[in-house]
Image: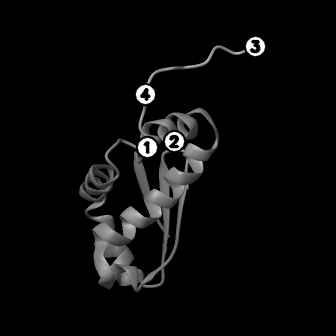
Amino acid sequence: MAKRNTEEATIGDVLKAFIGKGKLAKGLDKVDAKNAWLKVMGPGVANYTTEVILERDILYVQLSSSVLREELSYGREKIIRLLNEELGKNLIDKVVLR
């Protein structure tokens, strides 16, 4: 029979522990990365963003404007830093603009 845990914990702490143990954390990271892209880059860039996918530590961003893609490519390091700050952890190591 399993030992009962008598320590008190908040619901948030219990959910974080549960999510962190399974594959659910990876799925949530993907959603968080997409939301961070849209928030950090703002509505101007969001209008030209057609797809945002996180695979391992690489964020793939599909843009409908080649001019915007070229402009953003000059600031990749800053974009990565801003996204990781928004996420609160170093989740993204590279951004690929397509």
- Mark 2 burial class by Cα count in 10 Å: few <14, some 14-19, many 20+: few
Three-letter code for the amino acid on which mark 2 is drawn: Leu
Give the residue number, with chain letter if any, for mark 4. Answer: 8
Give the residue number, with chain letter if any, for mark 1. Answer: 12
Q: Are marks 2 and 1 in contact (CB under 8 Å)?
A: yes
Give the residue number, with chain letter if any, for mark 2. Answer: 15
Q: Nearer the viewer, mark 2 or mark 4?
A: 4
- Secondary structure under tag 2 reads helix
Place of residue 62 in the rendered image (x, y in percent of width and height, measured from the top left): 51, 73
- Mark 3 burial class by Cα count in 10 Å: few <14, some 14-19, many 20+: few
Three-letter code for the amino acid on which mark 4 is drawn: Glu
Q: Residue at x 70, y 15 (%)?
A: 2
- Secondary structure under tag 4 reads loop
Work out how far the residue at label 4 is from the one at label 1, CA to CA, in angstroms. 12 Å
Whether residue 94 is situated above or below residue 53 in the rendered picture: above
Q: Which one is nearer the viewer's eye here, 14 or 70?
A: 14
Residue 83 as seen in the image, left or right of residue 35 = left
Please report whichever mark, 3 or 1, sits nearer to the chain's N-terminal start.
3
- Mark 1 burial class by Cα count in 10 Å: few <14, some 14-19, many 20+: few
Work out how far the residue at label 2 is from the one at label 3, CA to CA, in angstroms. 23 Å
Give the residue number, with chain letter if any, for mark 3. Answer: 1
